[in-house]
Image (tube, rainbow, N blue to C red):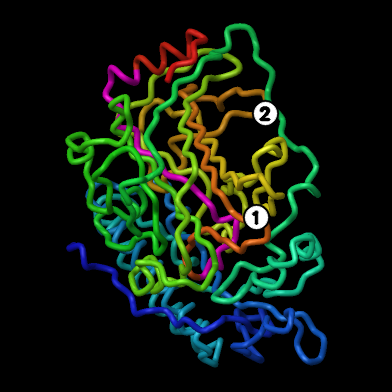
Amino acid sequence: MNAKGHKRPRLSSKVIAMVAALVLGGGGVAVVAGNANAGQDGGRSPGGATQVTATIDCPDVGDRLTSVPGQARTEVDESLAELDVQVADAYRRLAGGEAGGNALLGELQGKRDKTIGRMSDAIARSAPRPEELKSLSGCQMKEAAAQDDPAAAAAEDQGSLARNVGGKGGPARSDFVAIGKVRPNVRTPGAAAGASSGSFSSQCGRNENGHSNPDNVIVAPGVSNGAHHMHDYVGNKSTDGFSTNDSLAAAGTTCSNGDLSSYYWPVLRLRDGKAEKDAKAPGGGQDANVGTILRPKQVSITFKGSPVGKVKAMPRFLRIITGDAKAFTNGTANANASWSCTGFENRQLKDKYPICPKGSDVVRTFTFQSCWDGRNADSANHRTHVAFPDRDGRCPKGFTAIPQLVQKLTYGVAPGARFAVDSFPEQLHKPVTDHDDFINVMPDKLMATAVGCINGGRTCR
């Protein structure tokens, strides 16, 4: 597939807000009213009812795949990317005010049936047919608060936020909370005898060289705009949707210690109405990701140890995704990114954006899975080859502890300024969809140094 594959029509730029009535019996959905100006009056309809934004909720086929034969991998990856295009296109039509929810969902199901069928055929050529995928073609509407919600009271503490948030598919006022109203909630396991208490850091910059694209080589290799949102990259200078292990190993790096690994995450934007350089591009304005892209003030990349024992080296080209880009419709089982503010990092949020007081910066923290199955550098759903330790720091049976990547991004955001993370368009820029991606391309000697520092209790930079 060439780099122009999987391009989509441009998304409508109109403000998206609807009063939706969900008729779930038999899979039917009726959208009973639409108002492109909803939210300008605080989110209340003339009758006083709270308005909602409708989006499209489809089963995540990729997450259900536990095994894909190598011969079918390329065709499966292309089909999964095609499913994302179909959902995003249906959402574009819904957001544009197209009536007939039942007809739209029926058309979407027909497209998904065919794509899932081709995917199943590809797998069945060299493995048992995944019959369970047949049930995943149907979608439904999902509603979310548009502007007015009791939880928005926290946003009222910062009046400008309450007036400015909303429009263009999210986020809603209720997606924000004043960090001072959050109780401390961080628990750190105590270190046992023999714990690996050291750390190893890579200094890779803040993406000063502007390495960004809407690809995702882990979940959509060989596909342009496979993420439908813009990623910032540090470390490996070559990463895009068409990277291979060989191309990554041959590339340069922004890391001062020679770490060739690829670290990437969705950009954070001010929802300020200004045209960014990608305003008419895939992953940007064409996918409802709008506003000024914020560059982090600081990017911290640190590998830590295990509180219950030593860690072993990661295999080169290990791929890990933490968090879930589709958590708003998938549910929060794989949600993992945390939001907070400097000075308040004992209070972490997963489903809210923080409103930070003056002098405090917004912080995104990603604590990656640190248990590895000892065999695979990746898995069919990009999750089952790694796992999180339990509350005490112990890995599941059959998994071994590896260095735990903790990545922290700090942003200067004025109190009350509206901002949002880039997302798939139908995910409405919800904070719970934040996620981070990592491909280990450290030279083996550097990885050995990292493991030695961590197991030896030393702090290495």
Report the residue that reaches farthest toward the front.
Answer: 359
Q: In which quarter of the image is the N terminus?
A: bottom left
Q: Position of residue 428 (x, y in %)?
A: 56, 68
Q: Is mark 2 on a helix, strand or loop?
A: loop
- Residue visible at 54% across and 74% down in the picture: 56
User: Looking at the image, is mark 1 or mark 2 earlier in the sequence?
Assistant: 1
| Tag 1 near tag 2, CB within 8 Å | no
Is residue 413 a member of the stretch shown in magenta? no
- Residue visible at 73% across and 56% down in the picture: 177
Is residue 442 a member of the stretch shown in magenta? yes
Q: Position of residue 379 (x, y in %)?
A: 38, 42
Mark 1 = which residue? 353
Report crowding for label 2: few under 14, some 14 to 19, many 20 or more residues within 10 A (C-alpha): few
Left or right: 35, with 212 as reference point:
right
Q: Where is residue 342 in the image (x, y as percent from the top left)?
A: 65, 40
Q: Foreground residue, 100 or 65?
A: 100
Residue 112 can be seen in this image: no
Q: Foreground residue, 281 or 164?
A: 164
- Residue visible at 44% across and 84% down in the picture: 107
Q: Which amino acid does label 2 sit on?
A: Arg
Mark 2 = which residue? 391
Left or right: 176, with 215 as reference point:
right
Whole-angstrom CA distance, mark 1 to mark 2, is 25 Å
Q: Position of residue 270 (x, y in %)?
A: 53, 62
Residue 197 is drawn in which quadrant? top right
Frontmost of labels 1 and 2 is 1
Q: In which quarter of the image is the C terminus?
A: top left
Q: What residue type is labelled 1?
A: Tyr
Q: From the viewer's perspective, is residue 30 above or below residue 394?
A: below
Q: Give the range drawn in magenta.
A: 426-447
